[in-house]
Amino acid sequence: MNRSAPRFARLDPASMTEAQRRVAEAIVAKRGGDGTRGPFNLWLRAPDLAERLQQLGAYIRYGSGLPQRLVEYAICVTAIAWNAPYEWYAHAPLGVKAGLRPEDLRRLRDGEGPDPADAALSAVHAFATELHRDKRVSDPTLEAVRGLFGEGGVMELIATCGHYVTVSMTLNVAEVPIPDGEPFAIPAG
């Protein structure tokens, strides 16, 4: 990833098409920033797709019926599964803000499962890990998530993992750099 130039030049708002500008403004309104950080810089090359992807991401992050700490944990499991350092960089701190303990993230980063006393985190870990690794989940893993969150929660967890696979793939193809150079650092807390 040590390139002299990025794979995709950062879009300048002054040179964006009207469709790109509209989507970038929607991203800024929902998430802040300049609308071109993370995967958005590449997504904006296809503004209609970018709009739909950012809407799904906003739903997952801000509208899901799953507790936010579990959403962020599933995103971090996805980042590990896809070796997506920028995704980890962006979401590990959000996980801590949402109630994950830095120890939960250290264990995940180091290939350990969560504290077994945390049934919800353990269920999400097993589900997301099996889904990424095996491309399916076992009956006991499915039943643990269904028992905790219902069938709607199962679908939301699938969508979270799937959407963040798309995000991770985008970040990896674009080789989005880590601003602080610490791709798998765990925030203090």
Image (cartoon, helix red, strand yellow):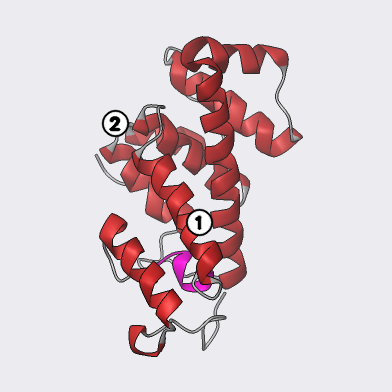
Q: Which residues are magenta?
A: 36-43
Instruction: Identify which residue, 38 or 63, lies in the foreground.
Output: 63
> Label 2 is placed on what type of residue?
Gly
What is the spatial separation of the Cα atoms under label 2 and label 1, in whole angstroms? 28 Å
Within 10 Å of the Cα at label 2, are there few (<14), some (14-19), or many (20+) other Cα atoms?
some
Quarter-wise, where is residue 181 in the image?
A: bottom left
Between discs 2 and 1, the one toward the N terminus = 1
Say whether residue 112 is visible: no
> Label 1 is placed on what type of residue?
Arg
| Residue 142 vertical position relative to residue 60 in the rendered view, above or below | above
Q: Quadrant of the C terminus?
A: top left
Is residue 16 located in the magenta-colored stretch of the structure? no
Q: How far from the left and from the top, in percent, is residue 157?
A: 53, 31
Q: Nearer the viewer, mark 2 or mark 1?
A: 1
Query: Which residue ends up furthest to the front in the rendered image?
Result: 18
Reading the image, the residue beneath label 1 is 52
Q: Quadrant of the N terminus?
A: bottom right
Q: How far from the left and from the top, in percent, is residue 51?
A: 47, 61
Say whether residue 182 is visible: yes
Reading the image, the residue beneath label 2 is 99
Q: Residue at x 40, y 27 (%)?
A: 65
SS at mark 1?
helix
